[in-house]
Image (spheres, rainbow, N blue to C red):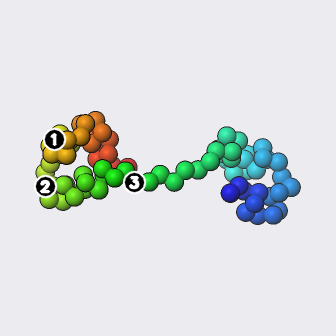
Amino acid sequence: MSIRTRAPEFAQLSVERLCRAAGVCRSQYYREFKVLAEPPELCLIRELQERFPRYGYRRVAAHLGMAQKRVRSLMRPA
């Protein structure tokens, strides 16, 4: 849903003027927003951390049989 469909008064303005007023570049206007779903491995990691709060990414990876880099990136705070 674009800015133009949300408010009818914006339909008369050009994309360039809308983006300049909003402080964003035109590529962001045309970009489709994707809702990022939570990876299924993250639930397993959280459950394991609840049981063993002192486990780091290496132990979690070994326990789950996953790659350390993948576990580390999932455990990183957002």
Of badges 3 and 2, nearer the viewer stands 3
Q: Is residue 45 left or right of residue 28?
A: left
- Residue matched to label 2: 52
Q: Is residue 65 above or below residue 22?
A: above
Q: Measuring 14% from the left and 59% from the top, which residue is drawn there? A: 51
User: Which amino acid type corresponds to the residue marked 1 in the rendered image?
Assistant: Ala
Q: Dot 1: what SS?
A: helix
The image quarter in which residue 69 lies: top left
Relative image position of residue 4 (x, y in whole percent):
77, 57
User: Which amino acid type corresponds to the residue marked 2 in the rendered image?
Assistant: Phe
Q: Dot 2: what SS?
A: loop
For marks 3 and 2, the one nearer the N-term is: 3
Q: Measuring 15% from the left and 45% from the top, which residue is drawn there? A: 63
Q: Is residue 78 left or right of residue 64?
A: right
Whether residue 25 is visible to the viewer of this picture, yes or no, is no
Instruction: Give the total of numbered labels.
Output: 3
Q: Dot 3: what SS?
A: loop
How dense is the environment of label 1, judged by Cα within 10 Å: few (below 14), some, or many (20 and up)?
few
As rendered, which of 20 and 9 lies closer to the eye?
A: 9
The Cα–Cα distance between marks 1 and 3, rounded to whole angstroms, is: 21 Å
The Cα–Cα distance between marks 1 and 2, rounded to whole angstroms, is: 13 Å
Q: Which mark is residue 38?
A: 3
Q: Measuring 25% from the left and 54% from the top, which residue is drawn there? A: 44
Q: Is residue 43 above or below residue 64?
A: below
User: Which amino acid type corresponds to the residue marked 3 in the rendered image?
Assistant: Glu
Of badges 1 and 2, nearer the viewer stands 1
The Cα–Cα distance between marks 3 and 2, rounded to whole angstroms, is: 22 Å
- Residue matched to label 1: 62
How dense is the environment of label 3, judged by Cα within 10 Å: few (below 14), some, or many (20 and up)?
few
Q: Quadrant of the N terminus?
A: bottom right
Asked whether disc 3 touches disc 2, contact meaning CB atoms under 8 Å apart, the reply is no
As rendered, which of 26 and 36 lies closer to the eye?
A: 36
